[in-house]
Structure formats: structure tokens, C-alpha cells
Image (cartoon, coloured by chain):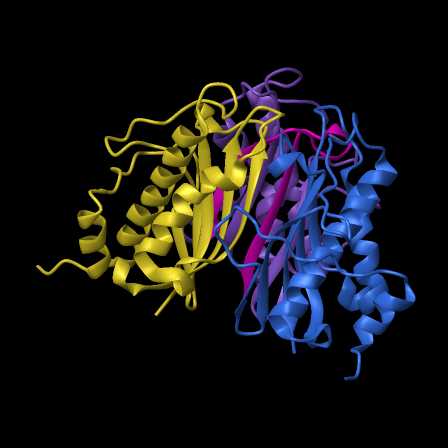
Chain colours: A yellow, B purple, C blue
Amino acid sequence: MSKSSIDQKLESFGLSLPSPKPSPGIYKPCLTVGSMVYVSGHVSMNTDGSYINGKLGKDLSDEQGKKAALQCGLAILGSLKNHLGSLDKVKRVIKLLGMVNAIPDFRNHPQVINGCSELYVQLWGEENGKGVRSAVGMGSLPGNVAVEIEGIFEIE
Amino acid sequence: MSKSSIDQKLESFGLSLPSPKPSPGIYKPCLTVGSMVYVSGHVSMNTDGSYINGKLGKDLSDEQGKKAALQCGLAILGSLKNHLGSLDKVKRVIKLLGMVNAIPDFRNHPQVINGCSELYVQLWGEENGKGVRSAVGMGSLPGNVAVEIEGIFEIE
Amino acid sequence: MSKSSIDQKLESFGLSLPSPKPSPGIYKPCLTVGSMVYVSGHVSMNTDGSYINGKLGKDLSDEQGKKAALQCGLAILGSLKNHLGSLDKVKRVIKLLGMVNAIPDFRNHPQVINGCSELYVQLWGEENGKGVRSAVGMGSLPGNVAVEIEGIFEIE
């Protein structure tokens, strides 16, 4: 079985996709409409499936938040791979909504969500890895996770 | 006048659609682009049009929040019916953004938003009633309502 | 060089577009898919590029928040003009997500985000200037800006 080029890149970066976990929520992880794939909010979890919890500006440093956003990005890739069969079917990132669990005074949401966006630029390049984006601060997130990211991707 | 099958299901569940209320906001409740209907954020209101207010984790129990999310789901159906003429034109749920008015420590957003998602699965089934979703905690919501939900639906 | 009709309207209102500023975030301001243009979250900045900061309900009055939302609306127009070449290519507003940086008790998000929506109705009229919308309260926003708005527009 040949590995997809995206799988090979992830391996070369030393990254692996978190194991999917059952969720208490009633939704699909991904849903295709024509050439667009809508992706549910994916929360920050380590590769072993344990959650990355806490609020930015209080419990976690910006660097830890950025790592949490990277893990959201990997969790999204895991769901896209399950949904599409291969990550090589992804053509480009259309849109991300990066939601940071933060105290009211937190200011560095873009730098945190860059943890996900930098990965996608490494995988798909400047043109296709960068979509539109909002990076904003939530009052709370499910299970007190640090970051949650939802998105829209275009497929071939 | 024959009732739509969705209307009949709602009646059999003992549910009715909230009366639409004038909003201070400048927007359309629904807007169609091709086969996609975009739906504005709908706030939690009872069938008589009174709002369901308060913050999860402080003023309302999770069960009360789940009821508030159900009422958002019904308010969306009311707007979709006005917009489309019949709810039988809805093919499937594409996406929901479930926004919970909560204290910073609240953790059970998915369980709250399930109040809306369970209704949609009862109406359209597992395949078409479940779309992608994010269920997240807002710092505040208009008029201190408990829940606000926006969405995208596909029509025939 | 002839001015577009939208440019002429903005001039007649005494409004000008904020100068774009480099952002610490990794994203595109706008991205076209078919006839839809997705627009990133644009934060409240004055025409000279300085940010409008502070939380509604504490640091800023509702009127100041409404002005901040207007400036977000202008910043979006600046990015759309860069992306499309002319604002006359915009056919209609599809969707706005208006995010207000507010204290937990704030209630007037719709009135604040109307600052953007009123501008769009002045530019494109009741039918095309009004899309679907959610106006909600964030726990925090990048750099403590007062308002951030993202959107989807349809082009000719």
C-alpha cells in the first residue's frame, strides 16, 4: 500500500494523527457538498487521544496554545482522511474558524491559531494551504479544551 | 390544505414553532444560494415568543440549556418554513454553529446543543439530520439569551 | 480612471477605506470559490490604520461599538477591492458573523453590528445589502479590538 504524499510529509515532520475519540455530540466530523468538505469543530487533543485543556492567558503559554492548535489541525486531518480515504484528495484550505479558550484580557489569538495554519502551509504550500480565517477568543469550550477549530476544504 | 410530513412529525412530538418576533438587527432570517440555504443566528425563545435567558453554569441547568437549544432549532424551522413555503423542501442539515451563553468554567456545550441536533435527527433521520457542527461557549449573547444557533441547510 | 459606483457612494458618505495593515496571522484576506468570496475576520481599525480597542459594556459605549463595526465593514470593503479589483463586482452580501468583544452582561450585540449592516444596505440596497447574520459576544479578541467581522459575499 503506497502512502499518500501528505502522509509522507506528516511522517517526515515527525507528526502523527490523533486517534479519533467518541464524542458526546450529535454530528458528523465531515460532510461533502459538491467539491466542498465542511469539517466540524475539532478540539485540541494529543496523539494518544488525551485532551489539551486550559485557558490561554492563565493555564497555558502562547507556545502551548500554538501546540494545541497544531493538534486541532492534525485531528482535522485525521477526520478528513477517514472521510475521503486519502488526504491527497484535498485541493486547498478554504476557511478556518480558530476558537481559543482564553481569559478576557488575552490578545494573541492569531499567533495561537498559526499552529494549525503553519502546518497546512507546510503540507499544501502558500497558495493552497492558506485560506481565509478568523482567530477569536471564546468564553468557554467543551471540556475546557484549549482550542477548537472548524473549517471548509476544497477537494479535487 | 395538506400538512407537510415534517409538520406532522412536529405535531406528533407535541412541538410547535415559535412566533417570529421583530429583531433589532439588520439581516435576513434565511437566504438561498443555489441549493444551499444560509440561516441567521436564531436565539432561544419559547413558543409564545418570550426569550429563554441566562448563562449555563450559573442561571440554567444543562437540561434547561438543552431545552433552550431545542427552541432555537424550532425557531430555525419557523424561519425556514416562512422562507421555503414548506419544510418538506429541506433535504439535509449541512452545518450548525451552536453558541452557548456560559460561565468561563462551563464544559457541557455539546450536550446542550444536542437539544437541537436530536430534534433534527428525529425529523430527517441519522443521515440527513446530522450535519457538521461546532458547539462552543460565548462570553455574552444578545439580550442575555441562553443559546443562539446558526446553520446551513441543503434543499431539493 | 473612472471610479466605481460603490467608490462614489463611499465618497459621498464621507467614508474612506482603512489602509491595510500587516497581520501576525497566516491567512488570506479573501478567497474566491466560484461566485462566492469568503472574507477573513476583519478587526475594527480607524482609517489611519490604528485599532479601535476595548470591551463593550465597560470601555466603549454602544455608539462607539457601532462605529467600530462600521470600520470593520470598511476594512472588509478595502480587502474586497484589493481582491476583486473593483467593488462593483460584488453582487450581494450572503452572510456576516459579527463578533463583539464584550463583558459577560452585555446585551446589545445586534445594535453594534448594525454599524456594518447599515453601511452595506446603503451601498447595495435592502435586497442585496442584507444577508444572514449572527451578532454575538466573544470572551476576547486579538489585540483587544472591539469588534471583528467575517463574511461571505456573492460576485457577478
Residue C42, x across and y down, in percent: 65, 51
Question: In the image, what residue occupies the spot 30% across and 34% down?
Answer: A21
- Quarter of the figure with residue B80: bottom right
The answer to whether residue A13 is seen in the rendering is: yes
Is C25 in front, or is C5? Answer: C25
Q: Considering the image in quadrants, where does the N terminus of chain C appear?
A: bottom right
Examine the structure image and report whether residue C127 is included in the region drawn in magenta.
Answer: no
Q: Tell me where residue C73 sits by quadrant.
A: bottom right
Up-down: is A112 above or below C35?
A: above
Eyeballing the image, is A51 above or below A77?
A: above
Above or below — where is C46 with respect to B108?
below
* Residue A109 x %, y %: 53, 37
Asked whether B47 or C107 is in front, the reply is C107
Q: Give the quarter of the image for residue C111.
A: top right
Q: Residue at x 39, y 29 (%)?
A: A64
Q: Residue at x 62, y 25 (%)?
A: A104
Residue B135 visible in this rendered orientation of the protein: no
Q: Is residue A61 left or right of residue C65?
A: left
Q: Residue C66: x percent and y percent?
A: 82, 44
Q: Which range is magenta? A: B128-156
Q: Nearer the viewer, residue B14 or C149?
A: C149
Q: What is the residue that sits farthest to the top in this orientation?
A: B58
Based on the picture, tell me whether residue B129 belongs to the magenta stretch.
Answer: yes
**A27 left or right of B17?**
left
Q: Please state the horizontal and vertical placement of residue B77, each as a whole percent of the image.
A: 65, 49
